Amino acid sequence: MVTSLSELAQRKQSGRKLAVLTAYDYPTARLLDEAGVDLILVGDSLGMVVLGLPDTTGVTMADMLHHTRAVRRGVKRAPVIADLPFHSYDTPEEAVKNSRLLVEAGADAVKLEGGRSKIGQVRAIIAAGIPFVGHIGMLPQSVREEGGYKKKGRTEEGAAVLLDDARALDEAGACAVVLESIVPDVAARITAEVSMSTIGIGAGSRCDGQVLVTPDLLGSFPWFRPPFAKARADVAGETLRAVREWAVEVRGA
């Protein structure tokens, strides 16, 4: 189990995969920490699975700070990564200011979406002494611009762009990068070429680790689950059963 971000390089060299999950509240964060996950991500995916928004673009800094504080209260061991939400890092100065707010709220590292196009922001965050995690491939904050969620790296040109983005983040000093919805062979090439840890989601099994949205793993958000996420529990079904049984008992019918 990882207890510090400084251990990531050694884990990559050892070949032992990283297990990463999202958390948005105290009880979930505490349970994940006690279960031994390596890293906990306070993802802006909370927009959909907690706040009921259609995508992540409506998540605000206030939302991220609120949920990061809650997660921090539940975690004693695992490093906590917090997402910088949409339009919170348009300039390097804004990126540093908001990254500092997330660290004050309890994050051990921050994450933003984009590669070489955001390298000025990335370098500024790292220069400010804040550990950084990248995110390339399918970018949820760009879903409206791109017209949906699309697999990345299908062409040689697309693969070259992803490799260039990964190298730029690696050279800037990122400790890890999320590879989302990338063709598995391309994700494997990135993993082999960079010194930072790669954390895949819908990018095949040859990354240095895997991340899932916890409600997808637990089956607690039944209205949508991506095809690559296998539910290992049925929390939604159990919730419906328990509530219906209790309601019948209360009503005496």
Image (spheres, rainbow, N blue to C red):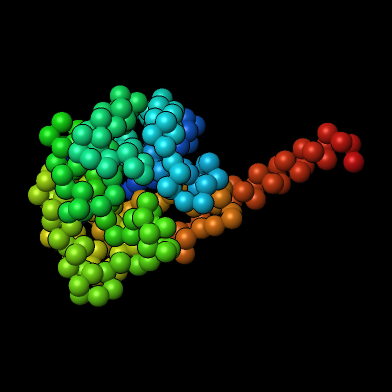
Percent of width and height locating residue 120: 15, 44
Total labels: the figure holds 0
Figure check: 154 above or below 133: below
The reply to whether residue 24 is visible in this rendering is yes
Quadrant containing the N terminus is: top left
Figure check: 155 above or below 213: below
Image point (36%, 55%), residue name:
142
The reply to whether residue 23 is visible in this rendering is no
Figure check: 204 above or below 22: below
The residue furthest left is 171
Image point (32%, 30%), residue name:
102
Image point (20%, 72%), residue name:
157
Percent of width and height locating residue 32: 42, 38
Image point (47%, 33%), residue name:
25
Percent of width and height locating residue 165: 18, 57
Left or right relative to 177: residue 252: right
Figure check: 187 above or below 19: below
The residue furthest bottom is 155
Q: Of 196 and 150, which appears nearest the observer? A: 150
Quadrant containing the C terminus is: top right
Q: Of 137 and 90, which appears nearest the observer? A: 90
